């Protein structure tokens, strides 16, 4: 049986360290980090995410600014709000919840966010900096995956990593981070041939394809560490939905050395890393050293 990687517990610890650093920052420098979250429309999943983000922001001692705009908000109005937030000194981080309604160009809005306040790390300049290894704000879910891997494995240098999925939010940035940690990285996707065989080579598998329970036990080298980024709601047969990852947990748990569960694995790390990015962004904007305790 593999070790369960308890992301919920790890995220709680990280949030506590962030809260302590926020207290220190306000005592020593009279600064309170502020995070603005913008939601356009009524996507039910986005509403839950935004509520959780705002609550955990306040719990960490930061200021939360929440903007809920109607689904018919124009791109012009949204860009106007982003510009105001860019110029507001009380706002150190800005997150526009995706997806946006179809009439709004996501890349245009994301790239309007000030690079220094882009706590999602989705701005093209932050993406570029990540790929050339410059300091930048790094996307939250990938950052969370790396923290869990380092906690389990220590040095990642020389490990063979297979990332399944090539999205801009997870697959590509997590691959860049693994490369930064000196892994040999393969990015697999829907057109990859012999995917089970490719995965069996890996010391580290990051599953981020969005396909429920696709990764099976015979895809995994015994002892490998498996990080499951998938969150899929499937019909459990009794009319109720059940959350599953991209990994067939029961089967893979017999082979892997360690494995993240769904829920309670990578999911809780995403918001913890968003708070971490907000703290990092604040420190950089006001010229204070980023505390080591959140490294
Ligand atoms: N929608 C789903 N995940 C994310 C995320 O990490 N950031 C934003 N802005 N929107 C999302």
Image (tube, rainbow, N blue to C red):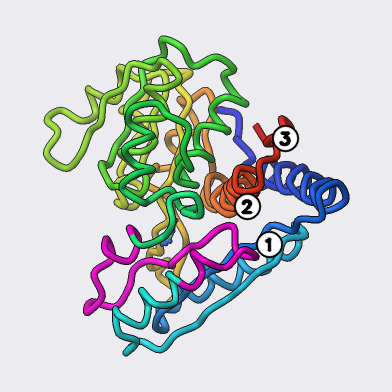
Residue at 50%, 82% (x, y): give it: 68
Is label 3 or label 1 in front? Answer: 3
Q: Dot 1, how many residues are within 10 Å of its Cα: few (below 14), some (14-19), or many (20+)?
A: some
Picture coordinates of residue 92, whole percent (x, y)? 59, 58
Residue at 20%, 39% (x, y): give it: 189
Instruction: State yes or no: residue 95 in magenta.
Output: yes
Q: Residue furthest top?
A: 158
Picture coordinates of residue 7, whole percent (x, y)? 62, 42
Separation of disc 3 and disc 2 at Cα? 13 Å
Quadrant where ligand 1 appears: bottom left
Separation of disc 1 and disc 2 at Cα? 8 Å
Q: Which quadrant: the N terminus?
A: top right
Vertical relation: 112 (above or below) 229: below
Task: Examine the image and state in which quarter residue 187 appears.
Answer: top left
* Of pointers 3 and 1, the one earlier in the residue sequence: 1
Asked whether 5 or 86 is in front, the reply is 86
Vertical relation: 233 (above or below) 76: above
What element does badge 2 sit on?
A: helix
Q: Dot 2, how many residues are within 10 Å of its Cα: few (below 14), some (14-19), or many (20+)?
A: many
What element does badge 1 sit on?
A: helix
Is label 3 or label 2 in front? Answer: 3
Separation of disc 3 and disc 1 at Cα? 20 Å
Residue picked out by circle 2: 275
Residue picked out by circle 1: 56
What element does badge 3 sit on?
A: loop
Residue picked out by circle 3: 291
């Amino acid at each position: 049986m593999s070790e369960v990687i308890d992301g919920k517990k790890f995220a709680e610890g990280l949030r506590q360290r962030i809260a302590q650093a926020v207290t220190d920052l306000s005592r020593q420098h009279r600064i309170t980090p502020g995070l603005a979250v913008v939601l356009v429309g009524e996507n039910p999943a986005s509403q839950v995410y935004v509520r959780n983000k705002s609550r955990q922001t306040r719990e960490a001692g930061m200021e939360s600014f929440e903007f809920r705009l109607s689904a018919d908000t124009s791109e012009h109005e949204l860009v106007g709000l982003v510009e105001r937030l860019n110029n507001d000194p009380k706002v150190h981080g800005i997150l526009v919840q995706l997806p946006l309604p179809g009439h709004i160009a996501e890349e245009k809005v994301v790239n309007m966010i000030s690079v220094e306040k882009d706590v999602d790390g989705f701005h093209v300049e932050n993406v570029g900096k990540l790929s050339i290894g410059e300091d930048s704000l790094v996307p939250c879910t990938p950052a969370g995956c790396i923290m869990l891997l380092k906690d389990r494995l220590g040095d990642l240098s020389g490990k063979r990593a297979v990332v399944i999925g090539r999205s801009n939010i997870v697959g590509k940035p997590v691959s860049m981070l693994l490369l930064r940690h000196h892994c040999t990285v393969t990015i697999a996707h829907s057109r990859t041939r012999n995917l089970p065989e490719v995965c069996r080579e890996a010391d580290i598998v990051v599953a981020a394809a969005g396909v429920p329970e696709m990764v099976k036990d015979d895809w995994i080298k015994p002892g490998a560490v498996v990080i499951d980024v998938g969150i899929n709601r499937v019909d459990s047969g009794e009319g109720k939905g059940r959350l599953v990852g991209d990994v067939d947990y029961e089967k893979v748990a017999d082979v892997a050395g360690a494995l993240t569960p769904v829920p309670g694995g990578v999911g809780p790390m995403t918001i913890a890393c968003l708070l971490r990015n907000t703290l990092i962004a604040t420190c950089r904007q006001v010229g204070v050293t980023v505390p080591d305790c959140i490294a």
